[in-house]
Amino acid sequence: MRNPLLPLCATLALPLFADPVKVILDTDMITDFDDVGALACLHALADAGECEILATVSCTRGNASTAAIGVINGYYGRADLPVGCAKGMGVMGAYAGAKEKVDPASPLGEKGPGDGGHYKYRKLALDYPQWVKYLDSDTAPDANVIYRKALAGAPDKSVVICSIGFLTNLRRLIETQPDEISPLTGRELVEKKVIKWVAMACRYPKGKEYNSQYDGQSSRIAFENWPTPIVFSDWQYGGDLYAGRSIAEMEGPRNPVKDVFAGNIPTREEVRKDPGKWRDWCFGMGGRAAWDETAVLAAVRGEEAYFNVHRGTYKMIGDTGENVWIPDEENGPHIRITEKVNKLEVGKIIDELICRPPKRK
């Protein structure tokens, strides 16, 4: 498979890395598809020795989210990665706000708006069944168990948690109690083992953002009680940074990452005809807004590799999902990233990672 972005590698200044960063990825895999790009980037970085993926968990339930995670993990030769799912609370079904479960084993039917965009993930499971570990996310292990095992087995202050979905699992994790896995509470375990949490969440300077809005109560509890620094790649940063067209248009055979992007990015001609409409929907000539991929870059290569950083607090207002940024450059416990390296160049870095073929297939 030809990677059209390989010549770009020589022209982009990449940071130097020491030991691989240990990462747990928490994703929703429910409607949007920058999650797929983010997981692809994470695997490419792991292939390059820049990180070690400890686990991949879903923050949504009652759908095919864990099946989609399993397919991507399997495509990159890591079918044995632990996969878990939120239990008992938070977002379920085919879209945020759905009131009932979607059965991944039911007939797929036609692509359309009725599934809330989850069609792409159900189709992924049908097209690549050899890598599906848990077709129905409700049959996957509890994400709490996956988190606690991964953290308990890791060296102190060695793990970065990267969340690119709803914050249900992070709230549930810090509320866990001592068990056979560890004598520590979830909050104590996080404090002992985690370096930082990188979250794709919130809207600057205030408002409602998808990941932090839905299950807003969990967002509030997690932000207020998390014992390590939190780095935010918020809606404003990623909303006009595009990636994914390169993999969608790349020559060569099908693969699950290419399928998702090719099936969901508007054509160049469509964008040319009405760029304003597509911009409002967070698409551009480069592809889809790369919110989740930027969170992975910050998690593995560090928040200062490509970004400016600002300190303060992202605070949730009540449980409705509204947030506000309170700046405090001296003592703020939270960091939000803004543009340092031109966003077009960051998009190229992301595209190059997404387009890399797996090393472990």
Image: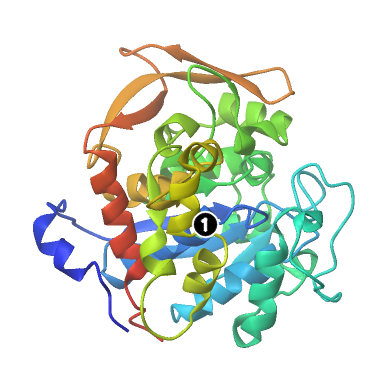
| Observer-nearest of 285 and 136 | 285
At a point 44% along the width and 41% down the height, the residue shown is 198
At a point 39% along the width and 28% down the height, the residue shown is 336
Is 130 above or below relative to 288?
A: below
Q: Tell me if 355 is positioned left or right of 150 in this view.
A: left
| Observer-nearest of 251 and 128 | 251
Work out which residue is located at the far right of the displayed protein and give it: 100
* Mark 1 residue element: loop
Is 122 above or below relative to 80?
A: above
State the count of labels.
1
At a point 68% along the width and 26% down the height, the residue shown is 321
Q: Tell me if 273 is positioned left or right of 15 in this view.
A: right
Q: How is the image coloured?
A: rainbow
The quarter of the picture where residue 356 lies is: bottom left
Coordinates of residue 359 in the picture (x, y in percent): 33, 81
Please tell me how crowded label 1 is: few (under 14), some (14-19), or many (20+) other residues with Cα within 10 Å: some
Work out which quarter of the rendered image holds the C terminus and state it.
bottom left
Q: Tell me if 152 is positioned left or right of 171 in this view.
A: left
Coordinates of residue 190 in the picture (x, y in percent): 51, 43
Work out which residue is located at the far front of the displayed protein and give it: 273
The answer to whether residue 28 is visible is: yes
Work out which quarter of the rendered image holds the N terminus and state it.
bottom left
- Which residue was labeled with disc 1? 266
Coordinates of residue 154 in the picture (x, y in percent): 43, 58
Amino acid identity at mark 1: Pro
